[in-house]
Amino acid sequence: MIDDTNAKRWLTGVLLGPTTVWFLFMLVLPLVVVAIFSFGMRSPEGGYVASFTFDQYFNLPSRLAAFKNTLSYAPLGTLASLLIAYPLAYYLAIKVNQKWKLLLLVLVIVPFWTSLLIRTYAWIFLLGGKGIPSLLEFIGIEGVRLINTPFAVIVGIIYGYLPLMVFPIYISLEKLDKRLLEAAADLGCAPARSFFQITLPLSMPGMATGCMLVFILLMGEFLIPAFLGGGKVFFIGNALVDLFLQSRNWPFGSAVAITLVIIMLVTVSLYMRLAMGKSTGQDESLM
Amino acid sequence: MSNNFKDNQPITATKLMEEFRRYQKGSVSRRHFLGVTGLGTAMAVMGAATPSLMPGSAQAAGKLSNKMVLSTWPNYHNPKTLENFTSETGVNIQANVFGSNEEMLAKMQAGGGGVDVIENTNYTFSTYVKLGLLTELDLSRIPNYDASTQNPKFSSASTIDGKIYGVCKNWGTTGIVYNSKKIKSNPKSHKDFFDVTMGAGSGHSILHDYQLTTIGAALCALGYSFNSIDKGELAAAEKLLIEAKPHLFAITSDYQPGLRAGDAWMSICWVGDGKQLNTDLPEMQYFVASDGGELWSDFYSIPVNTPSLDTSYAFINYMMDPKNQSLDAEVHGYPSSDSRVTGMLPESAQNDPILYPAKELFNALEFGAAESLTDPTRAEVMARFKSA
Amino acid sequence: MTMRLYTFAVYLFLYVPIGIIVLFSFNSGRHASDFQGLSVKWYGKALSNPFMMDALTTSLIIAFSAALLSSIMGTMAALALQRIRGPLKPLFDGMIYVSIMIPGIVIGIATLVALVTVFDFLNPILASVWPEGANPPKLSLGYMSVIAAHTLFTMSLVILLVRARIAGMDRSLIEAAQDLYATPWQTFRLITLPQIFPAILAGFLLSFTFSFDDFIISFFVAGTNSTLPIYVFSSIRRGITPEVNAIGTMVLAVSLILLVTAQILLRKNTGKSSAAAE
């Protein structure tokens, strides 16, 4: 019996071994090194000089705008994606006929299979002077500028991450027992009321997952603001790229990165406690 | 798969041993040995699995590798010149395009092995050399280079402590380009640039994503030196830049697409881009600003850990051939520091007012200084401007 | 009806940019912004461009390795995690969530900083212990660093997927197998594996897609290697030609073919595995 538990322990160790090594070398070690660097100083030629100073953290307010931008565009972009994705997911899960369902679903993912870079590039053209604005000019609306504006960045965000939002919502709506809706209708419940009282609460977990996925990706976004914001809409991601690949200020870059990680951990765990906690609570109450 | 036909030929056992002995004696390079024996392919596969465990440069003179990496700038070569090099030598060129010297330096500093030739600018040499990132050049391996036909004003920046680290590719001015169909006020200076940007041309100007030229432009507009690192003057420049930011079309060093699409009307501009734009679209006017600006020269240099020194030299030597330089210049449009090249150009090009501005304008230009590139205050001003 | 119109509009929004990419890949002109006539020459150019093909090969090798590593290691970890109790479990859960939550850009930067530091420390040591005359190996950024960095994220993804599948698994079958004196290996091979296989496959495909499409992590840790996204990024900077559109169209076409094939395979496989389970 003792041998048996030993063997089991040994097996568990072997199974977890590679993952442990990976977490140690690719997650813990890099984060520790970055944390150490964030207390260092920039050498005159760029790079890092060992030191122990909080200067880098005191300098954080100089990137306040980047933090503000990210922390406002990320929720805004998430909300916009949610608003556009929900009706689509609803239609796909509840309204559309079984025959077309799979095809329509696949059609939502397909754009996701081309490179985000190339898709974003397509928008540079579409929003640029020879794209949509020239069409608008054709129908008499002149002087509209779309490229390199906050609007362009939001469009890019929605376009880039819509599928990530549609899928979780679709899955939670798909699981919904349609007999509940029928029963509600039989009992004289108005469609709008049954939507708000049954459908919407039941799709909460999907919405929560989708929002979290999109939010996490947006917090580290670099490409979309760089390409569609013309360097004028500045995210933390852009600040980080500049710090490491332009001014070569590794210590300050490390401090910004550590701060971003802390913000992420705090917001996401708060969010999980609030949104996820609430929705699972409702799940249970329904059972 | 290899472009070097010899790599694909079978080899006999005796030939293999013979080659191996030559390799041991050091009379052929390792690269040659591997190429001839077909072990190269095997090594390449292993190299893919265990990256960078393959030793760096070939020791002895010998064969060229079948590809090289060139760190360059947007629109900086005639595709034909590069294609000709490939068809003559079998070396394929991968051009990595950068947005600024800082970025090029950052990638080199972060362990950018595997680059064969870089095209860095005059003011970067002291930093590169201090960091030990460049190979001292052996000019005898660049026979096409002739120091006596070079204009030392442009070609001397690569000499540090008597050692030569680069040969001059071309020089140029940094001025302003504008679309004369859209901007009628006939701007002449950096001051005009900012006035138009915040006035009639609001929403249509581009500043570079490069602190040297962007802060330099603001400094010139305020009447200060392009290279200033004075804290007060930089604060004034920062104020001007942040004030102008809402009126900008973009902050990018890749400004040709925006100008060509008609979205942008005016940009800080390197002369070659100005020439390219003016050739295709005559309404695009380039000028050197009356309140100063930058004069610069770019070089071909070899990083210390180049994969194949022979290839690096072969490429530079090829590019130093006046014939190839002028072929290149047909597309990039920058003036050469080599009198042999200038002599080959047609009369009209030799007196091109875009390339060779009037003396009083020319004399007001400054070479960028190494301190302007590495100054931490300037880096922070740029960062605050971008994130504002 | 409004719903239908709305859905149609969203699909239009999703597909117009793709249509533009595909359309301009057949442009005979040089500039991507003016359409000058139909031609397939950019496909020829892209396919005969050794760097584009190199970048594609690099991307495929990296994506395949990362996907393979993460499906194997992720599945192993998911199997182990269902049996452990005690403080180790929340520790692993924490690691999994942190590695999913941390933005790619931070992973890229942290990996770059850590690897460069470690290499700077190790390279002189390697050089000093290496035998005289031979070239000492020089550690630097490359394929391995990209694969390792991608695998961190994708491995955690596989763990989550496989774990969810294990949780929904029919335990009675395993108990039945044990009652019939099947060895643990037999139980795994005949009962568990077929049941969790769809999750592993889904994890593999997701990992592959993530790694193949990733730009920001590779941008920091690939050294001088170009992956396809890095190549495309550089091309967009160089002033884009329809060649990039041709590359994009080809990638899309291949993805579609893979997607359809995977769908067919998956259908067959689930058919088989449910048959095996019965």
Image (spheres, coloured by chain):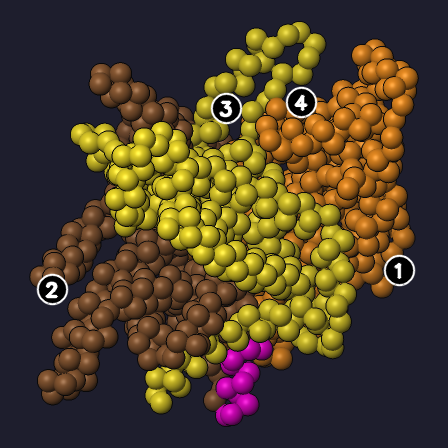
Chain colours: A brown, B orange, C yellow
State yes or no: discs 3 and 1 in contact (Cβ < 8 Å). no
The structure residue drawn at horizontal position 61% and vertical position 59%, both measured from the top left corner, is: C254
Q: Chain of mark 4?
A: B
Q: Are marks 1 and 2 on the same chain?
A: no
Q: Which residue is mark 4?
A: B55
- Foreground mark, 3 or 2, reads 2
Tell me the CA gap for discs 1 and 2. Answer: 85 Å
Under tag 2, what secondary structure? helix
What residue type is disc 3 on? Phe
Q: Which image quadrant: the C terminus of chain A?
A: bottom left
**Relative to C79, residue B221 above or below:** below
Q: Are marks 1 and 4 on the same chain?
A: yes
Q: Which residue is mark 1?
A: B346
Q: Which residue occupies the extreme bottom position in the image?
A: A140
B159, C136: nearer the viewer: C136
- Foreground mark, 1 or 2, reads 2
Q: Residue C119 — which label? A: 3
Q: Which residue is mark 2?
A: A286
What residue type is disc 4 on? Pro
Percent x, y for residue B159? 69, 30
Q: Are marks 2 and 4 on the same chain?
A: no
Within 10 Å of disc 3 (Cα), the crowding (few <14, some 14-19, many 20+) is some
**Relative to B18, residue A210 above or below:** below
Residue C182 visible (yes or no): yes
Chain part drawn in magenta: A129-140
Answer left or right for B84 relative to A102: right
Tell me the CA gap for discs 2 and 4. Answer: 66 Å
